[in-house]
Each structure stands twice: as C-alpha cells, then as structure tokens.
Image (tube, rainbow, N blue to C red):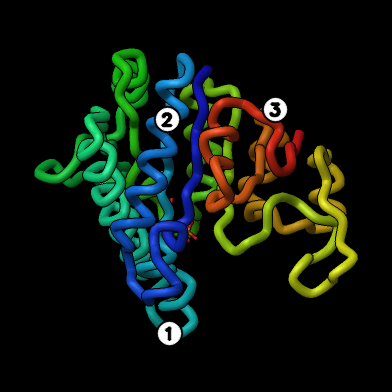
Amino acid sequence: MRVVLKLSGEALASSARDETIDASVVDHLAREIIAAKEAQDLEICVMVGGGNIWRGATGAMAGMDRATSDTMGMLGTAINALALQDALEQHGQDTRVLSAVAMAQVAEPYIRRRAVRHLEKGRVVVFAAGMGSPYFTTDTSAALRTAEMEAELLLKGTHGGVDGVYDADPRLEPNAVRYDEVSFEEVIAKDLRVMDMTAITFCKDNGIPIRVFDLMGDKTLRRALSGDAVGTLVK
Ligand code: UDP
C-alpha cells in the first residue's frame, strides 16, 4: 500500500517547551513511521507543513506581498523536511527530501517519476516546499501529491488534541460527535474543518479518501499508516 501523510509544521513543534522544532517530537514521529513501514509492505510519502516557522497569510496580513510571504512559508517547510529526514535516518531509514522549489545543494528536485522510484526502493519520501506555488497550502499540496503518486490514501494527522472530524468544534461544543466516516458532500455543506476547501474539493474530484486522526495518540500514527480505522475517514 502507498500512502501520503500530511504533517503540519506545528506537529514538529512543542507547545510545552515553546520550540520551533522539538527533536523528541520529531523522533517520535520518525519511530512511528518506521514501525508502520516495518510491520507491512508500505510505501510512505510525507508532506510537511511549515506553520511552526512561517505562514504566508501572517505576512500578507501585515502588509507584505503575498507571493513573497508564501515563498517564505515554503522555505520553512524545507527546514522541517530536513529535520524529519535526519530523524528517520538516525534510525536507519533511508529518506529522500524532494523539493518543489529548486535548492540543489539541499534537496533533490521534485520529479514525479523519481519519487515513485524512491518509494519502490523502500525509501521514505519527504516532500518539501509544498507544490512550489504561492497561494496554496501544504494540505492542497499533499492532496496533489497523493493523486500524482497514485497513493491509496491521504492521512491527515492532527496535533491539537482533536482526534477526527466532529459535527461541531469539540473544543467549543462538549456534545460534539465524532464521525467514523463522513462524505465529502457533508464536509463541504457543513464547512467541517478537515483541511482547507481547495484540498477537500481536489480530493472529492479525484476520489482520494482522507483519514483524519490524532497524530499524538498512543500508536495512532502507525495504525493510521497501516490502514486501521482510527479517527475519521472522509470519502
Ligand atoms: N505554501 C505555499 N505554497 C504551497 C505550500 C505552502 O505558498 O504549495 C506556504 C504558505 O504560505 C503556507 C506556508 O507555506 O502558509 C506553510 O504551509 P502550511 O500553512 O500549509 O503549513 P502547516 O499549516 O501545515 O504547518
């Protein structure tokens, strides 16, 4: 099975210690990815976000040129990608960072067929710089790469303590109910916060199921990677 895992930049940070990248958190994520990969024949790609470092919208709101600010965000994802690569390789897992923005000294360029080849050779592929275009997010980039890689599933790990998709915000509504499964139509109609709408409609149009789950739960990442029914399946 081939899957794409979307990790938010903030999932690499630590609120407890107020660090941009917390090595122990990244190490935990790397161990889980490796455990899932070793348990079964899995090909894993990771799209890393950059929200722990910079978000394009933040700069734009302060009056910066949006495209420039988004480019800063994309560069932030590259920093996170290198941190994840390092953690995976510390544990002996060969990993390649493929960047959508050329940075020849740092990472390979993203070339679809090369990414597929790395996966076939058992390497974990980490995508950096989203899709390389401003005005997009790494959620949408993850959806795009899932289609390009012909992966079966897009995994969206959350880190804020919300372990799936609810019919209302569970942090505000104590009676909110978590879905085991929910349709794209319902997510769109009720504006349920799964991923940004561009990513959702892309997945809907291309028949890509999304599993939303708690990244930090006990073994939830390895279970989600292995295809277990943790969290919520959007399809
Ligand atoms: N970004 C972009 N194009 C892309 C992917 C990302 O311009 O294809 C920029 C955008 O400014 C975004 C930032 O990179 O705010 C960080 O990515 P994102 O917000 O998706 O990170 P996450 O919230 O997942 O940590």
Name the residue tied to disc 1: 63
Q: Residue at x 52, y 31 (%)?
A: 146
Q: Residue at x 26, y 51 (%)?
A: 83
The CA distance from mark 3 to mark 2 is 28 Å
* Badge 3 vs badge 1, beta-carbon distance below 8 Å: no
Front of the two marks 2 and 1? 2
Where residue 218 appears, x then y in whole percent?
56, 46
For this rendering, which residue is in front, 204 or 17? 17
Q: Which quarter of the figure has residue 96? A: top left
Amino acid residing under circle 3: Gly
Amino acid residing under circle 1: Gly
Which quadrant contains ligand 1?
Answer: bottom left
Name the residue tied to disc 2: 35
The CA distance from mark 2 to mark 1 is 44 Å
Q: Residue at x 9, y 44 (%)?
A: 105
Q: Which quarter of the figure has residue 126? A: top left
The CA distance from mark 3 to mark 1 is 38 Å
